[in-house]
Amino acid sequence: MTRRLIVRRSPIHGNGVYAAVDIPAHTVLIRYKGRLITHAQADRLYDDGADTGHTFLFTLNDKYIVDANVGGNSARWINHSCAPNCHAYIEEVDGARKDKVIIETRRAIKAGEELTYNYGIVLDVPHTPKMKKLWACRCGAKRCTGTILQPKGSAR
Ligand SMILES: [Zn+2]
């Protein structure tokens, strides 16, 4: 993949992805890759996912989820932030199977900055204090909500 991105340990969580060079606003950085699985498969495979607070799953559309546990690229290391400098969007192609998750910069990013986007995660289960803690956010933004989980009913 491109030399614009570097993967290394992050103070937010685990590995993070950093800009190797200055990157202008609205630049397409990387596609979030992985195998395609259905929502039902995801539930079967990662039944405990809601209890770990970690995920390499990205909801592609009503049918499919991108599972970066298999065939994932460095996009899976991009951390969540409450004040992200990137955003992820779905590029719709003919047929749900071909849709793509694309990560793009929201603003100009300086070399050395960690790249982040809002995961937009809303769980089917109640967002109890325990769940919010499991999905704790340590992005360090001034307006950090303390959790990766987004308010229920919030649009992505
Ligand atoms: Zn945060």
Image (spheres, grey):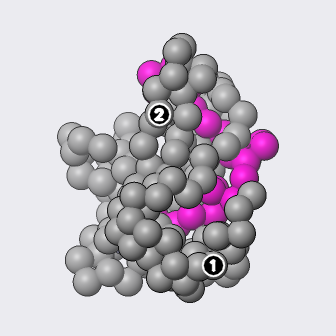
In the rendered structure, does residue 78 fall within the stretch colored magenta? yes
Question: Residue 57 in the image: x percent, y percent?
Answer: 59, 44
* Residue 40 seen from this side: no
**Badge 1: few (under 14), some or many (20 or more) residues near its Cα, within 10 Å?**
some
- Residue at point 64% right, 70% down? 4
Q: Which residue sits at x=68%, y=74%?
A: 6
Q: Give the quarter of the image for residue 95.
A: top right
The amino acid sitting under disc 2 is Glu
Query: At x 43% / y 62%, what residue is drawn?
Result: 105
Residue 53, given in percent of the width and then of the height, sits at 53, 59
Q: Quadrant of residue 139?
A: bottom left
- Magenta highlight range: 61-80
Left-right relation of 37 to 148: right
Of pointers 2 and 1, the one earlier in the residue sequence? 1
- Mark on residue 91? 2
Residue 127 at what x, y percent from top left?
Answer: 32, 52
Q: Residue 122 in magenta?
A: no
Identified by mark 1, the residue type is Ala
Residue 101 appears in the picture as rendered: yes
Please give the residue where the numbered disc 1 appears in the rendered image. 20
